[in-house]
Image: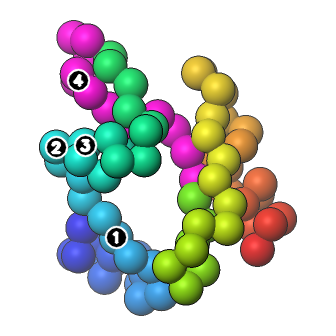
Amino acid sequence: MQAWGEAQNASEIMMLADGDASFTKALGLEMDTATFGGVRSQRYAMVIENGVVTQLNVEEPKQFEASKAETILAVL
């Protein structure tokens, strides 16, 4: 995550790996995909300002509207 963040010039963004889904489970945003990877994260976008979640957009299954860049940029 660190190398990818550096390659993308993501200096103002925290890059977070969640290999065991512990962060995802703490948020209550896990889903069980069974044979397609097991426990995975739902698709979502979160805006955090000074450690406080100010926006959480969780996608409906097979959708890509609530978490797309244009939607999030509109709330910033």
Corner quadrant of residue 54:
bottom right
Tell me, for residue 15, which label it has, or none: 1
> What span is in magenta?
34-45
Q: Please tell me how crowded label 3 is: few (under 14), some (14-19), or many (20+) other residues with Cα within 10 Å.
A: some
Task: Measure how far apart labels 4 and 1 are at the Cα level.
Answer: 21 Å
Question: Is residue 60 highlighted in magenta?
Answer: no
Which residue in the protein does label 4 denote? Answer: 37
Tell me, for residue 20, which label it has, or none: 2
Q: Nearer the viewer, mark 1 or mark 2?
A: 2
Amino acid at dot 1: Met
Task: Measure how far apart labels 4 and 2 are at the Cα level.
Answer: 11 Å
The x, y position of residue 66, in whole percent, is: 71, 43
Q: Secondary structure at mark 4?
A: loop
Corner quadrant of residue 76:
bottom right
Amino acid at dot 4: Gly
The residue shown at (59%, 67%) is 53
Between 69 and 21, which is closer to the camera in this rendering? Answer: 21
Tell me, for residue 69, which label it has, or none: none
The residue shown at (50%, 79%) is 51
Disc 1 vs disc 2: Cβ atoms closer than 8 Å? Answer: no
Residue closest to the far right: 74
Q: Quadrant of the N terminus?
A: bottom left
